[in-house]
């Protein structure tokens, strides 16, 4: 198995290629563009121009998907404290949203005095979506992503907000970034400096939504579109903006700002406390890939000069320190909700892992 000489990405990473010197295509692309993505004076100007272009023209200036996690809390706080914006926030309650997350969400939106709503879709449809995705692709996270993208597109229009601003970290957005990539975030990164018009947005969103048709049964795909995109009329799409494309991401700063200015407090798990099945889902993905699923994100952090390779190895090793009883409990919850067999799921994952690379 080959490993990049600069980051930790190896042959298990999808679409990876190595040059004659052993450098992966993810590193090659990002090194060429490093200065562009770290010119935060210019990036901040672009971000503020996007706000200026929509401010006061809609019922809400911005819509913010809010999980109650550290990143979305930080973004919401910054938008409230630094910009005079009318904000609408929403949270998808997919059946796996933890009580800790709900408690944080309710307290923060009250403290910051922003409008908020929990979005709940028909439970039978949600179970059908999860069951289909997990049976076919073995990962509930794919279903969450599909539903999340569709709902962000839909509800930003439904609430009549000028922009949707999300709190995905740089590592999450750039983990699949290389020249020629078809990663979902790539079009937004490629157009980050542009003033997108309606035609641009239609093209980007139809590309994203087209993946539903490509990877999901046609009947189910149509049901998903009808339920999740029912308020997007006449392709009235609004721009989808990553706050951390335009602002540097520093974990210590994020934690410090929200801990000192809101009721948000750091507990043992600061990354995925909002999801009741995260550890179970991660176990399956790690089993398939035969390495930590977060490897591409951690490798980006090396590329972005946030951590060293040595620190990255320690971080990846720490991810293996998960209580087996917790994993088993979460797998039971996941399989029960989706009415699928845990034994068959684990067997499929083990078989698939042998074909992964």
Image (spheres, rainbow, N blue to C red):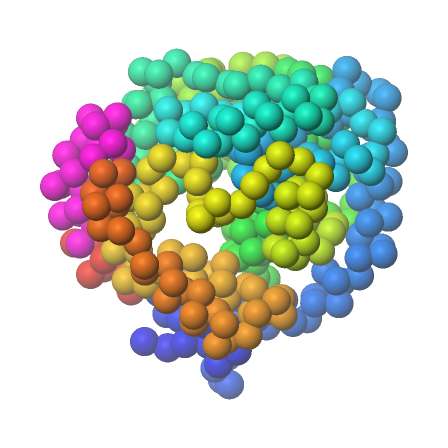
Query: Is residue 108 or residue 11 the one in the foreground?
Result: 108
x 41%, y 36%: residue: 275
Predominant secondary structure in magenta?
A: helix
Q: Identify whether 173 is placed above or below 139.
A: below
* Quarter-of-image position of residue 263: top right
The verdict on residue 222 being magenta is no
* Quarter-of-image position of residue 356: bottom left
Expressed as whole percent of the image width and height from the top left, the position of residue 335 reads 22, 32
* Apparent side of residue 109 relative to residue 44 in the rendered image (left or right): left
Expressed as whole percent of the image width and height from the top left, the position of residue 147 reads 46, 29
x 26%, y 26%: residue: 337
Q: Identify whether 324 is placed above or below 163.
A: below
Q: Magenta segment, which residues?
A: 332-350
Query: Is residue 68 or residue 228 the one in the foreground?
Result: 68
Query: Is residue 350 or residue 109 the one in the foreground?
Result: 109
Q: Can residue 277 be seen from the camera position used here?
A: yes
Q: Identify whether 259 is placed above or below 253.
A: above
The verdict on residue 334 being magenta is yes
* Quarter-of-image position of residue 281: top left
Query: Is residue 60 or residue 198 the one in the foreground?
Result: 60
* Apparent side of residue 328 relative to residue 200 in the rendered image (left or right): left
Q: Identify whether 205 is placed above or below 58.
A: below
Q: Quadrant of the N terminus?
A: bottom left
* Apparent side of residue 48 relative to residue 233 in the rendered image (left or right): right
Expressed as whole percent of the image width and height from the top left, the position of residue 322 reads 30, 54
Q: Tally the marks.
A: 0
Expressed as whole percent of the image width and height from the top left, the position of residue 287 reads 25, 56
Q: Quadrant of the C terminus?
A: bottom left
x 75%, y 67%: residue: 35
x 43%, y 57%: residue: 294
């Amino acid at each position: 198995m080959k490993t990049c000489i600069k980051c930790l990405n190896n042959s298990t990473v999808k679409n990876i290629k190595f040059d004659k010197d052993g450098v992966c295509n993810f590193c090659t692309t990002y090194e060429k563009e490093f200065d562009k993505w770290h010119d935060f004076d210019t990036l901040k100007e672009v971000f503020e121009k996007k706000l200026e272009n929509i401010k006061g023209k809609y019922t809400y200036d911005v819509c913010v998907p809010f999980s109650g996690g550290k990143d979305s809390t930080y973004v919401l706080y910054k938008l409230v404290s630094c910009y005079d914006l009318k904000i609408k926030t929403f949270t998808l309650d997919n059946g796996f949203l933890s009580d800790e997350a709900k408690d944080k969400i309710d307290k923060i939106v009250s403290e910051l005095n922003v409008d908020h709503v929990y979005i709940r879709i028909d439970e039978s449809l949600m179970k059908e979506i999860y069951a289909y995705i997990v049976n076919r692709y073995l990962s509930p996270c794919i279903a969450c992503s599909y539903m999340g993208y569709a709902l962000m597109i839909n509800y930003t229009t439904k609430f009549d907000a000028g922009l949707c601003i999300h709190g995905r970290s740089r590592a999450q957005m750039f983990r699949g970034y290389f020249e020629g990539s078809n990663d979902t975030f790539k079009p937004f990164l490629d157009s980050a400096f542009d003033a997108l018009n309606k035609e641009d947005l239609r093209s980007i969103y139809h590309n994203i939504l087209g993946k539903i048709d490509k990877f999901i049964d046609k009947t189910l795909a149509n049901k998903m579109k009808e339920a999740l995109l029912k308020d997007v009329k006449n392709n009235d799409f609004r721009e989808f903006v990553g706050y951390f494309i335009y602002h540097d991401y520093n974990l210590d700063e994020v934690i410090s700002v929200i801990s000192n200015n809101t009721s948000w407090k750091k507990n043992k798990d600061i990354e995925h406390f909002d999801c009741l099945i995260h550890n179970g889902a991660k176990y399956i993905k790690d089993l398939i890939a035969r390495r930590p699923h977060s490897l591409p994100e951690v490798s980006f952090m090396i590329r972005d000069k946030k951590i060293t390779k040595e620190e990255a190895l320690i971080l990846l090793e720490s991810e293996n320190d998960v209580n087996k009883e917790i994993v088993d409990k979460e797998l039971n919850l996941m399989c029960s909700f989706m009415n699928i067999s845990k034994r068959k799921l684990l067997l499929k994952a083990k078989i698939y892992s042998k074909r992964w690379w």
